[in-house]
């Protein structure tokens, strides 16, 4: 387990700048049944083959696909329901020799006001784009991730969300999204290469039952599954935005 050094002042400053507050459809294979009148008694049932992995991630347009690094072998695709919606879906894709294989679709929340191409501090929107996934951490112990993991009390979440739901436990597990941050540091690091006005602290974290300030949140069990699945050797990225923006 890789640990980072943090100080109390750094933790407080980091959380103050944190953006957190709070599928692809696949076609079923078609088969043609053998008429009962022509089937030979005792003949083996016709074989059905599993659908091939799509060569491209479904739902992504040419501009979005071009932004996915060639080295990326894992992509967490966050598809927002609408430009101004806080509801989205998360799917983990793995690139194989023949295409991209999809994991299950998980319900998720994004920012209260939806999505933006130009995120700024306090806009209550989640940034659209393709970003690296380099570092993780949380209040609880490492669940078995291969990402560098910082366990710290600095991940303690307090207060209530936009719907009055408690935020406690939201940062039990987090994955830093490499938007306006320095990769290779704890998610609590508050360095902002684009400046503090462009926001930061955009994470994948545990869902608290409502919209976030800028992060993407999924159920605790799904966060643990995602942490265990991501592998730095596969150069994971997150591809996120509302469905219309991703289709560009």
Image (cartoon, grey):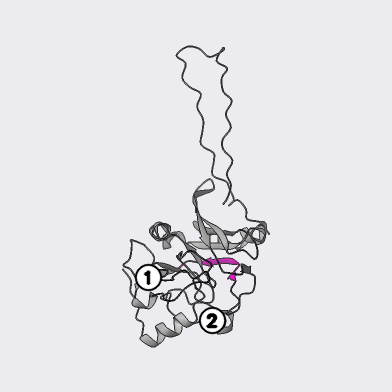
Q: Which residue is the site of mark 1?
A: 138
Residue drawn at x 51%, y 65% is 210
Q: Residue 37's x, y, as percent?
A: 56, 12
Q: Residue 189's x, y, as percent?
A: 43, 80
> Mark 2 falls on what kind of element?
loop
- Asked if residue 97 lies left or right of residue 155, the reply is right
- Asked if residue 190 lies left or right of residue 198, the reply is left
Count of marks placed on residues: 2
* Cα distance between the residues tagged 1 and 2: 23 Å
In the image, residue 200 sits, relative to residue 46, either above or below, namely: below
Query: Do callouts 1 and 2 mark residues in contact (Cβ within 8 Å)?
Result: no
Residue 111 seen by the camera: yes
In the image, residue 130 sits, relative to residue 102, either above or below, namely: below
Q: Residue 16's x, y, as percent?
A: 47, 82
Main secondary structure found in the magenta portion: strand
Residue drawn at x 44%, y 76% is 159
- Quadrant hosting residue 228: bottom left
How many C-alpha atoms fall within 10 Å of the one at disc 2: few (<14), some, or many (≥20)?
few
Q: Residue 232's x, y, as percent?
A: 42, 63
In the image, residue 241 sits, relative to residue 123, either above or below, namely: above
Looking at the image, is mark 1 or mark 2 nearer the viewer?
1
Q: Is residue 145 magenta?
A: no
Quadrant where the image shows the C terminus: bottom right
Residue drawn at x 52%, y 81% is 192
Q: Which residue is the site of mark 2?
A: 193
Residue 71 seen by the camera: no
> Mark 1 falls on what kind of element?
strand
Q: Which residues are magenta?
A: 125-134
Viewer-side residue, 69 vs 140: 140
- Quadrant hosting residue 34: top right
């Amino acid at each position: 387990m890789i640990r980072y050094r943090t100080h109390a002042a750094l933790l407080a400053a980091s959380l103050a700048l944190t953006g957190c507050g709070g599928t692809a459809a696949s076609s079923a294979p078609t088969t043609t049944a053998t008429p009962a009148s022509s089937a030979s008694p005792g003949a083996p049932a016709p074989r059905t083959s599993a659908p091939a992995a799509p060569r491209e991630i479904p739902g992504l347009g040419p501009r979005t696909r071009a932004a996915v690094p060639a080295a990326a072998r894992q992509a967490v695709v966050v598809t927002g329901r609408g430009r101004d919606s806080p509801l989205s879906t998360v799917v983990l894709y793995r690139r194989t020799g023949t295409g991209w294989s999809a994991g299950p679709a998980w319900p998720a929340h994004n920012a209260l006001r939806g999505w933006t191409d130009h995120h700024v501090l306090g806009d209550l929107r989640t940034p659209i784009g393709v970003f690296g996934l380099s570092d993780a951490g949380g209040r609880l112990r490492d669940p078995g991730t291969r990402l560098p993991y910082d366990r710290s009390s600095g991940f303690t979440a307090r207060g209530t969300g936009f719907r009055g739901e408690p935020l406690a436990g939201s940062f039990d597990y987090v994955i830093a999204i490499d938007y306006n941050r320095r990769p290779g540091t704890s998610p609590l690091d508050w360095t902002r290469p684009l400046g503090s006005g462009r926001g930061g602290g955009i994470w994948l974290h545990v869902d608290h039952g409502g919209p976030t300030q800028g992060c993407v949140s999924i159920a605790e069990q799904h966060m643990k599954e995602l942490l265990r699945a991501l592998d730095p050797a596969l150069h994971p990225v997150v591809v996120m935005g509302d469905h219309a923006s991703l289709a560009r």
